[in-house]
Amino acid sequence: MISFRLSHYRLLSLLCLLLLFNAVPCPAAETAASSEGYEVFSVTDCINMADSANPAIGLTIARLQEAGALVKEARSHLFPEINYNLSARRYADDPGLEGHLDYEGKEQMSAALSFSWPVYSWNRLSNNVAAEEHEQIARKWELLRVREKAIHEAIAAYWTLASSTESRYYLDITIHELELFQESARADLANEAPNALEKDVLQIEVEINKMQAWLGTLDRWYGTAAQGLAIAIGRPALRPRIADNIVRYKKSAISYNACLAAAWQHRAELKASAERIKSAGLQIDINRRLNWPTLSLFAKGMMMEDGYSPSQESTGVVGLSLKGTIFDGFRQDAKTARAQARYRETQSEHRLLQDEIRQQVYSAYLKVKEAYRKLVRFRQARHAVLQKLELVRSGYAEDVSDVEDVLETQVERRFRDRDYIFTKLNLLLALNDLNLACGARIYDFSRHERQIEDRQRKTEIQVENNNEG
């Protein structure tokens, strides 16, 4: 009886190995599929596409173009203004002025050309140009931040998509193992084996159904992540396929002080806020001198020709003008007070932004540490449960363990797989959030090293195969 059970278990192990081999993704098949109608994107591809084609970038570029137009408009006031005026008229009736010419049916044409150039305005015009230039620079920094957020969204969606694929892979393995074990347990129950009780064999069916129920959730998770990635890379009608089918990570030495220093140096919002403080300061000076006189150079020439005068008349004038406002109902004072309030507001916003960035960096840094510590522990726990599963399976063949022991360990393995997969994803998402909080590549996703994780993956497959055998 014992020899029969051992050979039966070897047959079961062989079937498991065959199913596992068929379940492992085949790079050659994936490459062939990519040539049959869809593209396969790497994380670097998605980063580059999001950096240029994310929908939010177009809106920010339009705002930047608007700022450029405002700078051009402000600069136009530094140049001379040249105007012309052309007119032609015909008198339809006689005005009835006795002793004068008969105007009826007569024509008159005139042409005038004027020139005006503000020579000195107490720096109001030049300060206005500088203020608009600071706003333009601020919007350039805002564009950079939008690009960073687009990359952040693409990376998060990419690795979420990879994690859903990996979760489906491990869940399929567990279901296949339980289905094969269910057949073995039913056979042992029919043979009245002492370690195969009916209630435990029925519980296998319960656990299989519970795990199969999660397949729909994983499909929804995959679809949501795929759509999010498509939007992030600017192809919302596409269902993208990615090169990674597992979550990969690399070890990184990161300190909080280095992260905070990077944020102070690179955060685009801080630089944009600093530019708006400069612009608000210039607005104060502009409004203080709003009513001060402007010295301008002007010139004007006019020529007139008519049908009732024997000669052609032309006049010209050149001169300087000094124009200002003596009293405007305290509008200048009100505008200056408003500019001062705006300046204090931008300073307060800058200080609040600094506090928010400090908190964001610290929170993101702690999440990275938490995720990495969990990953180490869950990885060890998963390794331990794989060893335990090997022991109870071999013990089941020798009547040392029963169906309940194998089932409980198999379900425990599923939970440890879940914890390990999700913690890997959480680590990459936390590193992605840290990059966004620092405004820099603290963890460079575009040069993702695969050698360490590849070796780890090969080791895991080898351990799994050993457990199955």
Image: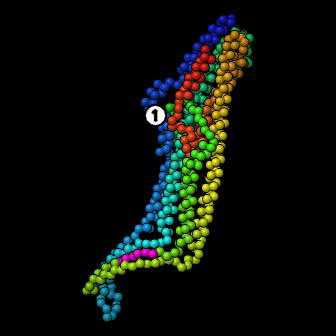
Q: Is residue 298 magenta?
A: yes
Q: Quadrant of residue 225?
A: top right
Q: Is residue 385 magenta?
A: no
The stretch in magenta equals: 295-300
Identify which residue is drawn at 44% across, 62% down. 72
| Residue 274 locus on image (x, y percent) | 56, 56
Residue farthest along the left direction in this orientation? 310
* Left or right of residue 187, residue 37 in this image: left
Q: Mark 1 packing: few (<14 Cα in 10 Å), some, or many (20+)? A: some
Q: Which residue lies under the disc numbered 1? A: 39
Identify which residue is drawn at 41% across, 68% down. 79
**How many badges with numbers are in the image?**
1
Identify which residue is drawn at 59% across, 75% down. 330
Q: Nearer the viewer, residue 325 or 64?
A: 325
| Residue 202 locus on image (x, y percent) | 70, 19
| Residue 239 locus on image (x, y percent) | 50, 36
* Left or right of residue 83, residue 361 in this image: right
Principal SS element in the magenta part? strand
Identify which residue is drawn at 52% across, 46% down. 147
